Image (cartoon, helix red, strand yellow):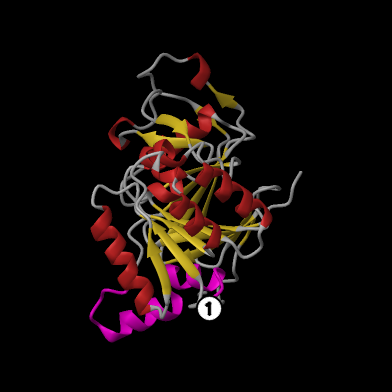
Amino acid sequence: MQKIKGTLIPIGGNEDKGIEENEMYTLEFIQEGILYHVVQEAGGIEANIVVIPTASSIPIEVGDNYLSAFSALGCKNVTVLNIKSKKDSEKEESIQLIKNANCIMFSGGDQSKITNRIGGTTIHDILLNRYKNEEGFVIAGTSAGAMSMTNEMIAGGSPREAFVKGAVTMYKGLGLIPELIIDTHFIQRGRFGRVSEAVAKFPDLIGFGLAEDTGMIIKNGNECTVIGSGMVIVFDGHKLTHNNEKVLEEGTPMTMTNLTVHVLSNGDQYHIKNRKVSVLPIEADFI
């Protein structure tokens, strides 16, 4: 099995962008915030960062927000690339931006826009190849941008219908990290049920529920470290002793027994290949 050399940073949405006027919060953003970690993983403030707001319904505003946020961190080479169609993913100028970037940052919005406009294109092939083969290459994504990183991608589902079959809809993502299913805004929008159903559908995969302003730095496709102010909920269903998802009619409440759930916070680690958790000692400082 090929060893992955790049880095993924899925983010749960609504990450701090340094817009607080209070100097204390601004200092925290610069020294500890999620986007600070993104910049450091990409090589620092000289890194070429390409922001892709394709998922957003207001891409210009979202792009401007990221330009401001990265500028506040001292970044000097940030470009916004709004891909509006598959044709845009085949344009030479778009391809060159992706080839020359140290970091790609996908915004939030509708994750199906990312996969419909980028999936299966030249840009998609370049992203996959660089992520697999280039150490220091970073692909970050918030909300929809995080969810699109997987192969089995959550496309929708209402938390009000949680724990019944059919409450979650799935779609094919970009396949950067096929071992996972990622959901975002997890705590704030009560999405426990839809990740549970997603894992019931694909019990060999691991579900990550990312709270807002919370992310994971994933190295080598395996070693995950939690960053940010919230929690990551991990759903491991590979030892389920009862799972009736396959035999139920849609709309029927599901049963799952022996689902393993971990609640992780800043600095804790998860290893995908052996499904092991490493937590910081209680007295340790935050990252």
Magenta region includes residue 77: no
209 with respect to 205 (left or right): left
- Tell which of 96 and 183 is nearer to you: 96
**Residue at the spot 38% in from the left edge and 17% down from the top edge:** 250
Residue 28: percent from left, percent from top = 38, 79
- Image quarter of residue 20: bottom left
Residue 202 pos. (x, y %): 56, 30
Above or below: residue 181 compared with residue 101: above
In the rendered structure, the answer to whether residue 105 lies left or right of residue 150 reads left
Image position of 33 with respect to 117: above or below: below
Which residues, given as a range, are shown in magenta?
18-43
| Residue 246 point in image, percent of width and height | 52, 18
Could you say where residue 77 lies in the image, as x and y percent from the top left? 43, 72
User: Residue at (40%, 78%) from the top-left corner?
Assistant: 73
Q: Residue furthest front?
A: 92
Residue behind mark 1? 285
Residue pictured at 43% horizontal, 69% vertical: 35
What main secondary structure does the magenta stretch of the protein show? helix
